[in-house]
Amino acid sequence: AQTVTQSQPEMSVQEAETVTLSCTYDTSENNYYLFWYKQPPSRQMILVIRQEAYKQQNATENRFSVNFQKAAKSFSLKISDSQLGDTAMYFCAFMNGDQGAQKLVFGQGTRLTINP
Amino acid sequence: EAGVTQFPSHSVIEKGQTVTLRCDPISGHDNLYWYRRVMGKEIKFLLHFVKESKQDESGMPNNRFLAERTGGTYSTLKVQPAELEDSGVYFCASSPIGEADTQYFGPGTRLTVL
């Protein structure tokens, strides 16, 4: 069974700083997807960024980028120039690439606070 | 376009009572998923519908949980009878066919069992 581990329950940085959230996973599959989801306080969870395991290039979405290390099974999220609106719970998630297995496996989450 | 909606947003019931949670997916999304987060733990998959059929119900914890999706539109998740350990946040997500890697989540229903 796949597992996802986020070792940082909470993090706090100053506005405009860069922050990196850690995520490791365990799987024997070769074809899979990795995701970072964000859940702001009292709001619904939204997808921040996704990575296909077969792609070597790290995914980037504006100020959000990942460092995908497939051999090490590591998938960290870097937020550059952090903003107050980045304050949220961040969940790392895994999905098997087999179309018949569509469930997301989540980590425990990291509560990120951006301070003014 | 309306997102995934869930009702109620919060439910407080006593142990032994029945509660029904509802999820309305994004229009046209045939895939519908239920997840839950028990306090302090990770979000866990419960089950997956494709239209009205249960594709994967491997995450359902026990037979006190019953999910339905009659007509392939909205879905309900009934807990009967509720136990203390059922407290948590229940999330619904949906995605179009062939796009399971892009799941859109609802705001969740916070269930408190006293």
Image (cartoon, coloured by chain):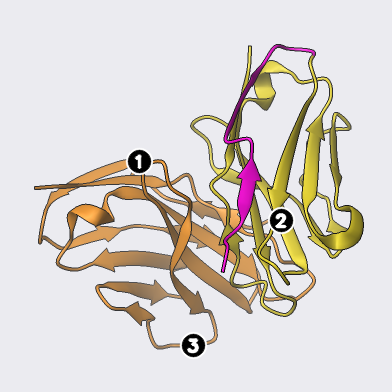
**Disc 1 + disc 2, Cβ < 8 Å:** no
Q: Nearer the viewer, mark 2 or mark 3?
A: 2
Part of the protein shown in magenta: B1-16
Mark 1 residue type: Pro
Residues packed near mark 2 inside 10 Å, few (<14), some (14 to 19) or many (20 plus): many
Tag of residue A9: 1
Figure colour of chain B: yellow
What color is chain A drawn in?
Answer: orange
Q: Mark 3 points at which residue?
A: A55
Q: In which chain is the residue bearing label 2?
A: B
Q: Viewed as shown, does residue B71 lie left or right of A100?
A: right
Residue linked to disc 2: B33
Give the mark nearest the N terminus, 1 or 3: 1
Tell me, yes or no, whether dots 2 and 3 are on the same chain: no
Picture coordinates of residue A67, whole percent (x, y): 34, 73
Secondary structure under badge 1? loop
Q: Which chain carries label 1?
A: A
Q: Categorize mark 3 by other alpha carbons within 10 Å: few (<14), some (14-19), many (20+).
A: few
Q: Name the mark nearer the viewer: 1 or 2.
A: 2
Q: Could you give the CA–CA distance between mark 1 and mark 3, rounded to whole angstroms?
A: 29 Å
Above or below, B60 relative to B53? above
Q: Can residue B109 be seen here?
A: yes
